[in-house]
Image: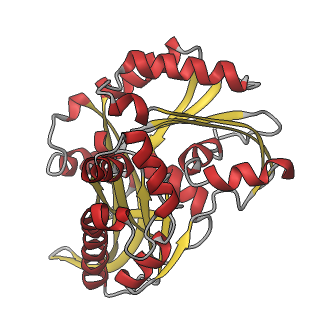
Amino acid sequence: MALFGSKSVLGVDLGTAGIKIAELSRSGERFELKNYGLLDFSAKESAGVKIGDDLLIGGLRDLLSRIKPSTKDAVTSISSFLTFTTVIEMPYLSAKDLEKAIPFEARKYIPIPLSEVVLDWSIINVKEISQYESSLAPKTQFPNVEVFLAAVPKNEAERYKNIFLSAGLNIRALELENIALSRALIGDDLSPLAVINLGGRSTSIVIIDKGFERVSRNYELGGFELTKVLSVSLGISFERAEELKKKEGLKGSSSFVQAAGPLIDMIVFEAKKTIANFEESKKTKIAKVILTGGQSQMIGLKEYFGQKLGKEILIGDPLEKVSFNRVLEGALKNVASSLAVALGLAMRKI
């Protein structure tokens, strides 16, 4: 597995409400932002236009023509909604035996035939020592291992390949969205923490421990629905409601709080339940919650989550290990959270 060296790589996030691209070059453990761009589909969606492959290809071509990246090599992520992931525990006898056993175990957790998915796995933890005894041998100790399983439908992998090929890009790697998020936001922090990714059309709540995803919950509720509720409640246009959401946020008894508060409380409730279940099952505590995604910059949101969850709330900074022209600092501050997945993808070693 070679490092990037000075060659640039594109991280391309085909999100539920738009496209985000980040172009990074790498020197050692440091990255330099060469280029970036965002294309928002939310206005088109509000008019009832479905984000199909043709729209994605056209949007990708348009964004590429505007930012003019220096490379066509891209790493992209596949949405959590389209993948199957879980952590299973197995006795470890040998790498060969584990490789044989995993497909049999995977059938218990993956709801479609294995012939229709690309299956990948990784040992993420040696959990404990179990005792095995036979009549022919003395007690022998074998470690139990936790294995992270991931399955991507082959038809979705092929679909992504066709989209990028049609847009004139070379897919160098396709990986899970949450892995890219972890790479961009967490780095070497091995403590258990939660990441809440508040996107345009969906929200994901991910528990990460020792650098690996342990729990992931996805909900089809995001900034689009919050704006739509405000639009209907006040009888104003979607565009005006979006402006009002950005201006007022969760300040006091704002019209946005009154209209969208119950939906935000649903996200808070699911996050609290997910965190509590993990803490109880693993006998551990999650001290920090990282907010990211396009909606994470909403006025008052950090304080609201902190009050409701009783945890330290941080706004994720995917630019922490990235150098960039300081002239762009103001503009990047407003979009950094939206670029988190794209930046994490561009940080991937190929």
Q: Residue at x 77, y 25 (%)?
A: 70
Horizontal side, residue 253 vs residue 11: left or right:
left
Marker count (numbered): 0
63 vs 23: above or below: above
Residue nearest the viewer, comparing 53 with 189: 53
The image quarter in which residue 322 lies: bottom right
Q: What is the x, y in percent for residue 279?
A: 31, 82
- Which quadrant would the N terminus be assigned to in this image? top right
Q: Is residue 30 visible?
A: no
For residue 253, which quarter of the picture? bottom left
66 w.r.t. 200: above or below? above
* Residue 196 visible to an observer of this rendering: yes
**Quarter of the image where one finds residue 310:** bottom left
Q: Position of residue 222 (x, y in %)?
A: 35, 51
- The residue under the point 50% across, 12% down is 166
Q: Is residue 147 left or right of residue 219?
A: right
Position of residue 172 measured from the top left corner of the image (x, y, whole percent): 58, 29
Q: Residue at x 70, y 50 (%)?
A: 332
Image quadrant in which the C terminus is located? top right
Tell me the residue at 27%/79% (across/down): 130
Q: Nearer the viewer, residue 131 or 204?
A: 204
Tell me how the rendering is colored: secondary structure
Front one among 330 and 269: 330
Q: Position of residue 121 (x, y in %)?
A: 38, 49
